[in-house]
Amino acid sequence: MLNQSLSVKRKHYETRMKAVMLLSGGLTAALVLFLLVYVLAKGIPNITWELLSTSPSYLTERIGILPDILNTLYIVIATLLIVLPLGVGAAIYLTEYASNKKLVGAIEYAAETLSGIPSIIYGLVGMLLFSNNMGTCLMAGALTLVIMNLPTIMRTTQESLKTVPQSYREGAFGLGAGKWKVVRTVVLPGCVDGVITGCILSVGRILGESAALLYSAGFAHALNGIIDGLQAPGATLTVALYVYAKEQGEFGVAFAIAAILMVLTLLINFAAAQVQKHFAKRRSL
Amino acid sequence: MRKNQFIEKVIHGIFLLLGLITVGCVLLITVYLVISGIPAIREIGLIDFLFGKEWASTAEEPKYGILPFILTSIYGTAGAIVIGVPIGFMTAVYLSKLASPKVKSTMQSAVSLLAGIPSVVYGLVGMLILVPGIRKLFSVPDGASLLAAIIVLAIMILPSIIKMSITALDAVPKEYEDASLALGATPVETYFRVSVPAAKSGIAAAVVLGVGRAIGEAMAVMMVAGNAANMPNSIFQSVRFLTTAVSSEISYSGGLQRQALFSIALVLFLFIMLINAALNFFLKREKE
């Protein structure tokens, strides 16, 4: 019925736009699928136990990425340990304590600015600020990443704090609790989901980061424990990928790392979606 | 009681400090970049620095003109926007309005994956597929070029554009669309003549976000753009962006050359601040 009453011109518009939309959506889907399949197909055959479990040696011309895996782990742990209290604290200040609107605006604008600064600038500032004082080391890289991930943790925590019902706070106040006690016993337990989501997103960002780390954490492949490791320069997986691909032309190793990173990205996205679903369900009960 | 009040005040103070950390970080970054970026600009001269057409930092008579990098960054970003925005925008309209819930949620996870892939992986794939592909397809001596960088950047900004446009389009009140349909417009006409104009601030913000991503990307571009300090006269030329200009020389530079790199970072930072301000403007309008 509808189609009969439409002019030819409008019908053409309808089909044309639909075709363009489908084409764009299809292109995006094909792109994701291609990247996924290509990287996994080229990378997985190159992943061997020796690659995963050894450190590189020039003598035997062996390439191993165990140090890079460990460095990535160290830097994730160090960054999260520092950024969590800072980010959660800042979020609590904004939602629970702050009363000055201008100050809140300034803090939120600053957080937005931080999340818009490109990683190469973080790398440069991290180099000036941290590496020049404490040497090029994983800790300098971790501190750089702390600044980068601060807005993420802040935002996710803030969002979950907003879902804590105001009546809970009022109830606690009514029972005679002080502000700090209310924050500790009512507000903090309510922001667990935000903190977990923030952690997952931050881990994803840290795994993918390279420009901010190349000049603050360096690119050595030495095998260290966590304490020594944090004080020594070291490459994370992404930085190692860059060095192997761009400087050394070792594309097999580079693709092996890329495949590992791809799988980790998939896992992280899956985990983030699950956590969100889980908490959304609990909240609606 | 008095002791309790004292503790409350101390804790309030601690949270205030934590809250101010972000502001402190932004100030610290700005101050550091300005302090380390100004000396070289003074020595070279602002006009010669910004509009000098030649960058030869290691020559006997070094030249520090960054116009090639500025233009490359602008052309590269513009190219990525021209390719990425239409595809991303159309995908977003499709997913927000036309697609079934199942397709929508599957595609949204696919787009999240695209956003999560590390930039070095894009660089690696670009190095092995785009660069040789461009060399063969256009029979140029080297495929590492502005064109390769534009394509990589266009793909990398897709997720930001799609996600943000979907959010804006989903937020359009259902009544607007119902009214348009009731007046006899077809669904597709409604999407493009009612929903899209209603979501235009959010979509503008998505484009600005894409610009910010593209202009700030370093590693992927470093791997596919060739990195020669040429003026970007053709898309097949090996070029250097503002970001890659900093990262390609920083490890071995010293003296005025090193200071000039910090000045480049300062220029990049100013670009980003402008983009941030624009983004904020659109986001605020979207909220209203």
Image (cartoon, helix red, strand yellow):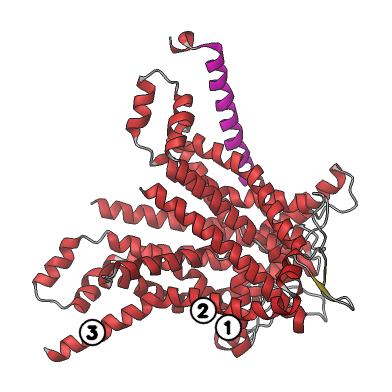
SS assignment at label 3: helix
- Say if labels 1 and 3 share a chain: no
Nearer to us: label 3 or label 2: 2
Residue range of the region highlighted in magenta in the rendering? A7-33
Question: Hey, what amino acid is under mark 2?
Answer: Leu
Residue at image position (11%, 88%) is B1
Q: Give left or right: position of B87 versus A102.
A: right
Callout 3: residue from which chain? B
| First along the sequence among labels 3 and 2 | 3
Callout 1: residue from which chain? A
Above or below — where is B108 with respect to A255? above
Quickly name the residue at label 2: B28
Quadrant of residue A216 in the image?
Answer: bottom right
Quarter of the image containing the N terminus of chain A?
A: top left
SS assignment at label 1: helix
- Closer to the camera, A246 or A159? A159
- Closer to the camera, A269 or B198? B198
Q: Which disc, if any, is residue B9? A: 3
Q: Which disc, if any, is residue A129? A: 1
Residue at image position (53%, 21%) is A14
Above or below — where is B25 with respect to A13? below
Q: Residue furthest left?
A: A175
